[in-house]
Image (tube, rainbow, N blue to C red):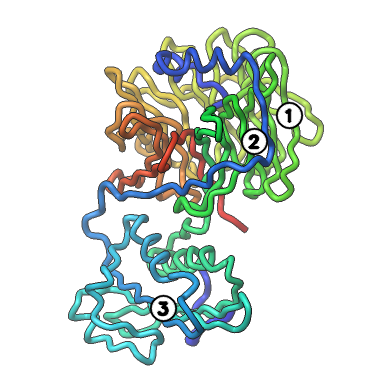
Amino acid sequence: MSAIAPKAPRISWLDPYRRLRQHHRLGSRLLRALLGVVLFAHAAAAQAILRIEITQGTEGATPIAVVPFGWEGGGAVPQDLAQIIADDLARSGTFAPLARNDLVARPSSGAEVRYGNWKAGGVDNLVVGRLRAMGPDSYVAQFQLFDVFREQQMVGYSFPVRGGQLRQLAHEMADIIYEKITGQRGAFNTHVAYISTQRDAANEKLYVLQVSDADGHAPETVLTSKRPLMSPAWSPDAQRLAYVSFEDPRRSAIFVQDLRTGQRKKISSVPGINGAPAFSPDGKQLALVLSHRGNPDIYVMDLASSQLTQLTNNRAIDTEPVWEPDGQNLLFTSDRSGSPQIYQVSARGGRPERVSFQGRYNASPAVSPDGRLVAMVQGERGRYRIAVLDRDTDTVRVLTDGTLDESPSFAPNGSMILYATEGRGRGVLGAVSVDGRMKQRFTLSEGDVREPVWSPFLN
């Protein structure tokens, strides 16, 4: 990668509470799951792309023009980098890219930019670029970002790239643009893991653990099973996934799988519940829920030694642990107060303290990267929606308006929350900005999709 002058620096195993509210759907499914599992590691599954629909936009978004990149090569352009960038910026809710029909000109370099034309069109920022073929499957892509009203370049780069990396490069460009304008790191070049249900050639139901780009493209199958897969969780380096599988007909088990090699390791398969894995911020420990001593409690396992430390010991149901960003404490769901609420406990154990107080049902915590916000499922009058607790002000804001919204997961920059919901009678994914103004829906052409989790930043 080289800069274009002037230089600019590149800046739930099983959720018992969900069972209660979904007994009409999950009861028989769980029973069938416990009867047996056939696992197909690395088996091919339909590579269905998650389609994104922006269902609610953001008023006051910054106008930006992303001009189609110039193409210097034979045949059709191999990838529309500008469209990918524009789509990324639009999904953030922070920017409102101009439609291509509204572009006043189509420059591909700074020398061709006429600022007056763009000022008249009300554009704040302008992105131009070009893609040049250098050889078989070899290219150089460059782009420049301009401040229209100051009439100056903000940033510009040139990248050597292979054909198979062009889409990823477009996401990286969008990240650079987003960060340069907002001061916040972009999260477009990240991944999403989720569980989808599909049908095989014999029309039998399959559970598929998949990973895709954050925009739903380039899905890859991690694991396929005839029995439920649950609770995917990313390692902090985004190289491993922990998840729960029912392949053993006697009990559930927690696995950790390396995404580069496909190798996996069984972490826990004790009698009773083995569920809700969550990596510590340093990747050396795994929080999990076990019930081999009676009620479900929160444990932490040292992954190098497999040594277990029990953090909670209560007659109530303790489940859904998540780590705080500093690794010193965990949040979890417990009904020890008579209804599901969020609690905090030290990673060394001790007396848990209640965190959520507004509402009778608060479960499935997710913590923002800065630790200030806690996303959760808040239930009221038979509706379950995603809400956010601001720990600085102790205020709660409901962000979604569904009836069965669940499994919240923050983007690694804290700007958006991904979650599972219902749409037209099947499982889909939703995304909402932390202020509730930008909303999106992710759907598969066929089947359901559940339990999404946003990856950390990719190194």
Is residue 299 visible in this depiction of the protein? Answer: no
Say few, some or many: other residues with alpha carbon within 10 Å of mark 2 (under 14 / 14 to 19 / 20 or more): many
The reply to whether discs 1 and 3 touch (Cβ–Cβ < 8 Å) is: no
| Between 433 and 353, the one nearer to me in the picture | 433
Percent coordinates x, y for residue 19 in the rendering? 46, 16
Q: Which residue is mark 1?
A: 267
Q: Residue furthest front?
A: 202
| Between 372 and 25, the one nearer to me in the picture | 25
Say few, some or many: other residues with alpha carbon within 10 Å of mark 3 (under 14 / 14 to 19 / 20 or more): many
Question: Which one is closest to the eye, mark 3 or mark 2?
Answer: 3
Q: Which residue is mark 3?
A: 69
Residue 321 lies, with reference to residue 92, above or below; the image says above
The reply to whether discs 2 and 1 touch (Cβ–Cβ < 8 Å) is: yes
| Between 325 and 139, the one nearer to me in the picture | 139
* Dot 3 amino acid type: Phe
* Dot 1 amino acid type: Ile
Residue 44 lies, with reference to residue 34, above or below; the image says below
The numbered mark at residue 242 is 2
Alpha carbon distance from label 3 to label 2: 40 Å
Q: Residue furthest bottom?
A: 111
Percent coordinates x, y for residue 100 in the rendering? 28, 72
